[in-house]
Amino acid sequence: MNNSFALRRRNDLIMAAVLTAAAACMPFLVKDVYVQNIMVLTLMYAALSQSWNILSGYCGQISLGHALYFGLGAYTTALLFTKFGVVPWVGMIAGGLISAMIALALGYPTFRLGGHYFVIATIVIAEIGLLLFHNWDWAGAALGIDIPVRGDSWLKFQFTRSKLPYFYFALAFCVVAWLITWWLEDSKWGYWWRAVKDNPEAAQSLGVVVFNSKMGAAAVSAFLTAIGGAFYAMFVSYIDPDSVMSFQFSLLMALPAVLGGIGTLWGPVLGAAILIPLTEVTRSFIGGSGRGVDLILYGALIVAISLARPEGLVGLFSRRKKETAR
Amino acid sequence: MTVSRRTVLLGGVASAALLPSVIKAQAQTPTEVVIGVIYPLSGASAQIGVDAQRAFETAADIINKNYDFALPLAKGEGLSGLGGAKVRLVFADHQADPQKGRAEAERLITQEKVCAIVGTYQSAVAVTVSQICERYQIPFLSADNSSPSLHRRGLKFYFRAAPHDEMFSTAMFDFFDAQKKKGQKIETLALFHEDTIFGTDSANAQIKLAADRGYKIVSDIKYRANSPSLTAEVQQLKAANADVLMPSSYTTDAILLVKTMAELGYKPKNIMAQDAGFSEKATYDAVGDKVEGVISRGSFSLDLAAKRPMVGTVNDLFKAKSGKDFNDYSSRQFMGLIVMADAINRAKSTDGEKIRQALVATDMKGEDTIMPWKRVKFDEMGQNNDADPVLLQYTGGKFVTISPPQAAVAEAIWPMTK
Amino acid sequence: MTTQTIVQSLASGLLMGLLYGLIAVGLALIFGLMDVTNFAHGEFLMLAMYVTFFLFAFFAIDPLLAMPLVAAALFAFGAVIYLLVVRFAMRAKTNVGMVQIFATFGLAILLRGLAQFFFTPDYRSIPTSWLGGKTVSVFGVFLPVPQLVGALVAVAAFGALYFFIKKTDFGRALEATREDAGAVALVGIDKNRVFALGWGLGSALVGLAGAIMASFFYIYPDVGASFALIAYVTVALGGFGSVFGAFAGGIIVGLVEASTALILPPSLKSVGIYAVYLLVVFIRPRGLFGSI
C-alpha cells in the first residue's frame, strides 16, 4: 500500500504539472476578457476552496466562517494601500499573518467544540467580524474602500484592462495552495488526521499533538484564504463588508470542495472548474430575465450533484476514491 | 489514471471553451444602438430591478416608435442623428454584488459592444461599474444612485442627471426652515437609517445639515438592514420623541418600521423620509393607513401631469407595462435612458469619447423632461446640479407635491398628525 | 434609560424570543431525530408565509384560521422534501454532514428562485387581519397582539410536542429511531417513514410560525434569510437534540437581542446574540441542554 500511495502521489504531481502548463497556455487561446474573467474567478475559487479544504476536509473541522479571513486579507491590503501607500504585496503578507494569528487565537477555544457547535461558532464569529467592519468608520464602514486605479503597474498590482497578470497570479496562488495540500497529505500531520478520522480513540491518545496540528492547519488555511482576499481587493478594486465578509461568501468557498470531493486533493479544483463557469454563465445569459431562472438552475444543480454524487465528483474515478478513503 | 486526467482536463477546457460560441450569437447591425442596463434582477432587491426593466423598456419604446410629445427623441422613429438607428437594450443582473456588476459591465462592453451603460440601484455596484466604464472609456449614467461620493472620484465618464443625497437632504432642511418661519416648532430630529451605503450617506448629509442650520439630533439610530425585528430601535425613537423622524430605509425595513411603531403605540409628530422604501407602492399597500401625512423626498411628481400633459401620457405607457405608476426610482431610470440616448443622438456616433463630449454639452430644458427639474446640465464632475428634488406628502391615499414652491400643488399639512 | 424602557424592551424581547423558539423548534426536532441541519429552514418559513398570504388573498382566510391549513401544507412539503432530497443526501459514506448541508443549501437557492419565478419578487403583506396592527397596553407596556398570539401558540406547540414525544407511540418511535436506526428496523419500524413524518412535523411547526408572522411581517422570496441564522444559533444555544433547549434558546436570544440594543448601537444588536452563544458553548460545549 505504501508503494501505491507513493505512486499515486507522483502521478498527482505529474498531472498537476500538465494541468498547470495547459492552464498557463489558455489566455493565448482565449482572448475574450469576459471568459478570462471567469477563468480568473475559477482559479481564485479553486485556491480558496483548496485552502478551506485543508482545515475542513483533511482536518475535519468544518468551517463556514472563512469569509472572516478572506475579508481580513482584503481589508488589510486595501487599508494599507489607500491609507498608507503600502504596496499590495506587503499588504497581502500582512493580511495573511493577521488572519493566521486570529485563526490561532480562535482555534484555541473553538476546537474543543464538536460537530455542529463548531460550525455555528465559525458562522457567528465571521458575522461578528462583518458587523464590526460595517460599523467601523475609519475602515470605510458601509461605504467600503474604493481603490483608485491609475495605469498599469506590477508594483501596485493594478491593470486597467488586461486580465493576464491577474490570471497568472491566480494560477500561481492555485498551484501553491495545491502543492501545500499535496505536501500535507504525506506529512506527519496528514497521517495524524487520517488516523483520527479512521479511529476516534486514536485521537485521544494523540491528544495534544493532534490539537496542535489542527491549530497549524487553521493558521495555514487562514493565511492562504487571506491571500485570496488580498487578491480579490486588487482585482475588483473595490471592497465593502457585504461583498467580502458575508456568510454567503463562506459557503461559496466551501462549495467547490464539497461538490468536487471534500478532503481530496483534486476535489476543490474540479468543483471550481464546473461550478464557477456555470454560475457566471447562468447569471449572464439567463439572469437578465429577472425571473430567478438562474437561481433555479444553480440551486437544482447543487441539489442534483449532492444527491447523485454524495462523495463528490472526484468519486467518478472509482480507483482514486478508494485510495483517498483509506 | 488516464481516465481521470482526461476528464479533469476536459472539465476545465470545456467550461472555458464553451463560452465564446454562446456569446457570439448576437451580431451587430449598423441600424441599432446597443445600451447596457445593469440592475439587480435576482436576490433581495430583484423587485427594483424588474420594475426598472419596465421603465427602460418604456423609454426605449418611446425612442424607437413615433410619439407626439415634447420629450426628446419621442417624435420620429429611432435616433435621427444616426439615420434612425433603433435603441436596443441589453439587461444584465448584478445581484447587488460589486464584483458581479464589474464583470457584467465588462461583458456588456467587450461582447455586447454597448456604447453606454445605465445603472445600477445599489451605490456599491455603481462604484465598480463606473470604474470599468472609465477604463474602457464608455459613458456611464448613474440613473438612480444617490450616494454623493460617486461623482467625487474624478471620473471622466461618470454622469448623474438626478439629485444626490446632499441635494435631497438640503431640500428637506429648506422645508424645515420655511416651516419654522411660519411659526412651527421644529427643534429636534431623530435619524433612523440602515447600515449600507444608502443609509450611511444619507445620515452623514443630514447630520452635517442639522449642525449647520441649528437643529438638534436627539436620536441617531443606525440599524441592520433586513432585521427580523425593529422593536428595540423603535423604542429608542419613541423615547426620544423628536419633532421630526427622518428614516432612510428600504422597503422591507420601512414596512416593519411603520408596523412596529404602531404596535408600540408611537405616533411620530412628523415623518420626513429619504425616499427608498417610502416611495414604494408596496409600503403603502401594506401600511399606508398608518402613515397618513408622511413626507418623502423624491425626484418625481405625478402632479406635474396637470402642467405638463406628457408626464401623464408617459406614465400611462409605463403603467401599461408594469401595472404601477412611476415612482421616484422608475422615473429616474426612465429619464436616465432618455438623457443618454439624447447624447448619443447628438454625438451622431457610438464612440465612447464622442458620446462623453455630447453628455458634457447636454443642456436639456426642464420642460422637456418628465421631472420637476430646472434643466439637465452636468458640472465638471458629471453631476446635474439643477435637478431640483421635490417633497411629496402622502395624503388621502396618494402623493401630493408640497415643495419647492414652484412645483407645489398643495400646502403641507404640518404637523402631520392632529 | 427609564424603567419603562427596560421593561418594554424585555417584554418585546420575550415575545420575539418565543417566536424565534417556534421557528427554531422544527429545526431542533429534525436535527435531534437524524443529525441533519436543514439549511433551507428559512425558505420553509418563507413558503409558509406565502401560503398564508395566498390563502388570504384568494380565499380571504384570516391568517389565524389559516394556521392549521398552513401547518398541514408544510407538513406535506417537509415529508416530500425528505423523501425526494434528504433521504438521498444521507447515503453519503463520508462527510454526511457536509453533503446534507449543501444539499439543503442548494434547495434553499432553488426555493428562492422558484418563489421569485412564480410569486414575483414583489413585497407582499397582509394589510388587515384579525390580529394585525392591534396592540394591548399593560401599565404603559405595549404588547402587539400578533406577537402575543404567536407567543401563546409557541408555548402551546412546545407543550404539545413534549407530550407527543414522551407519551405517544409514534413519539417513542421517533426517539428510538434517533437512538439506533438499525435496531428499530429489526422491530419492524420503517426508518424512512419515521424520518419523513419527523420532517413533516418539523416543517409543520415552522408553518405555524409562518402563519403568525404573515400577519405582521412583509413577505418576499428572500425573507427567510434573516431568520435562518437566528434559528441555527437558537438551536445550538439550547443544545442540539433538545426540543426544550430550542424553547429556552429562543427566549434567551430574544432577551439578549433586546438588551444588547439598549447598550450597543442597534446595528450591532446581533453581536450580543453571537457573543452569548460563544460564551455558552465555551463553558458548556453541548449547549445549555444538549445531549449530542
Image (spheres, coloured by chain):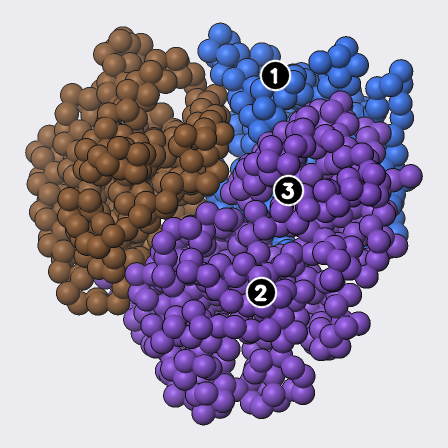
What residue type is disc 3 on?
Answer: Ser
Q: Is mark 2 on a helix, strand or loop?
A: helix
Q: Do the dots labelled 2 and 1 sit on one chain?
A: no
Quadrant in which the N terminus of chain A appears:
top left
On the image, the x and y values in percent for residue C70 come to 77, 43
From the image, tell me which residue sits under label 3. B248
Q: In this view, does A124 lie to the left or right of B357?
A: right
Chain for mark 3? B
On residue C263, the disc is: 1
Residue B339 against residue C223 in the figure, above or below: below
Residue B83 against residue B53 in the figure, above or below: below
From the image, tell me which residue sits under label 2. B333
Mark 1 is surrounded, within 10 Å at the Cα level, by few (under 14), some (14 to 19) or many (20 or more) other residues, namely: few
Chain coloured blue in this rendering: C
Chain for mark 1? C
Q: Is residue B50 left or right of residue B26?
A: right
Q: Which is closer to the viewer, label 3 or label 1?
A: 3
On the image, the x and y values in percent for residue B14 come to 27, 63
Q: Which of B370 and A13 is in front in this view?
A: B370
Q: For marks 3 and 1, give the CA distance.
A: 22 Å
Q: Is mark 1 on a helix, strand or loop?
A: helix
Residue at the spot x=42%, y=40% of the render?
Answer: A144
Residue at the spot x=75%, y=45% of the render?
Answer: B178
Quadrant in which the C terminus of chain A appears:
top left
Q: What element carries label 3?
A: strand
Q: Which one is earlier in the sequence, the residue at label 3 or at label 2?
A: 3
Q: For marks 2 and 1, give the CA distance.
A: 41 Å
On the image, the x and y values in percent for residue C206 come to 69, 35
Query: Residue B185, located in which quarter of the rendered image?
Result: top right
**Which tint is chain B?**
purple
On residue A321, the disc is: none
Q: Nearer the viewer, residue A272 or C259?
A: C259
